[in-house]
Amino acid sequence: MLKNALRHIKLNKGIMHDENQYIRLVKDILSDGEMVVGRNGSAKTVIGSAMHFSLKDGTLPLLTTKKVAWKTCLRELLWFVNGYTSNDKLLDNNVKIWKGNASREFLDSRGLYNLRENDLGPVYGHQWRHFNAPYGTCDDNYDGKGIDQLQYIIDQLKNEETRTSRRLLMSAWNPCQLDEMALPPCHVLAHFNVLDTDKLSCNLYQRSGDVGLGVPFNIASYSFLTHLIANHCGLKAHEFIYHLGNCHIYDDHLDILKIQAEREAYPFSTLKIDVMRENINDYVEKDFVISDYTYHPAVKMEMRK
């Protein structure tokens, strides 16, 4: 039993292609998941999963068994980093993933009659940069208000005496403001750690993971974020560790994921960030250069609200 446990750890550490951890999760849900009826439909579900993705030498774990819309992912991440909560800014960048949750109909279903259409409330970016600052609208100026969790982590990582702190956490889950949000956060807690003076890792806990659509996106997003913070703080991106609570595949995604799960993974792409900007807010899409992204054809899945 110990031998098998050690083998499992080694596989998760990258002797096997890291993407196979995702494929194994898909297969586990398909074979052993229980069908659960939830807020937005039926989904095969398992509880609890962990995956390790190496980020060494610029590795960027964009899944290869299907095409991941990495530009959409990166644009959303930079939107978070800037503390934005207006879906208008995403739509201006041709990012439509929040469109359903920003509609008048959906906001009203959440009781958010005070928010205009495309105002998402104090979601991720607000909590990352202005944690618990009283929320008015997405058009208000929140400079200097609330707690800037992201900047605190950056300041600690830039300081050689504090970068090995075990207290570098960033939470999007704020019970005080959940009812003001268009959608409570799924990826709720990021924990940053440094080993050997300069190797930066990120542990993410996600309460709920849409394995077909959301999880590949989240793997890419927090890998981008870890690379970005490492670059900005003069460190090396080392590893992204991904902890999932409720892992589910929606009923209309099951058949297409059976096809994806039989595909062989290609080597991961690499990322180079060409510049070091003065402020974390200043990075733009063109600063991120991705090379050698090879992938199987895209698969079509509908997003649930």
Image: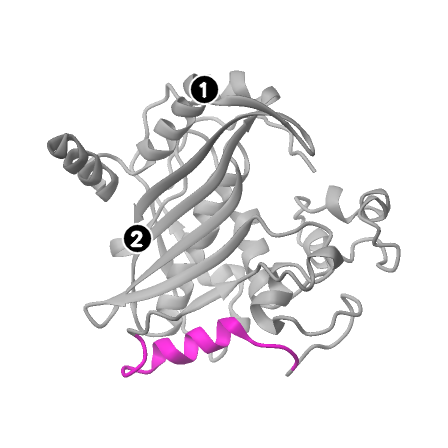
Local crowd size for mark 2, using a 10 Å CA cut-off: few (<14), some (14–19), many (≥20): many
Name the residue nearer the viewer: 259 or 149.
Answer: 149
Left or right relative to 204: residue 213 = right
Q: Which quadrant of the view contains residue 6?
A: top left
Numbered mark located on residue 55 in the image: 2
Q: Secondary structure at mark 2?
A: loop
Q: Amino acid at mark 1?
A: Leu
**Image coordinates for residue 287, horizontal then vertical, percent:** 46, 63
Quarter holding the N terminus?
Answer: top left
Residue 53 in view: yes
The magenta segment: 145-163
Is 148 inside the magenta-drawn segment?
yes
Does 1 appear above or below 82?
above
Q: Secondary structure at mark 1?
A: helix
**Image coordinates for residue 290, horizontal then vertical, percent:** 40, 51
- Residue ID at (68%, 57%): 178
Residue 280 in view: no
Labels 1 and 2: the sequence-earlier one: 1
**Image coordinates for residue 65, horizontal then vertical, percent:** 40, 29
Does 289 appear above or below 15?
below
Q: Which residue is mark 1?
A: 30
- Residue ID at (78%, 58%): 119
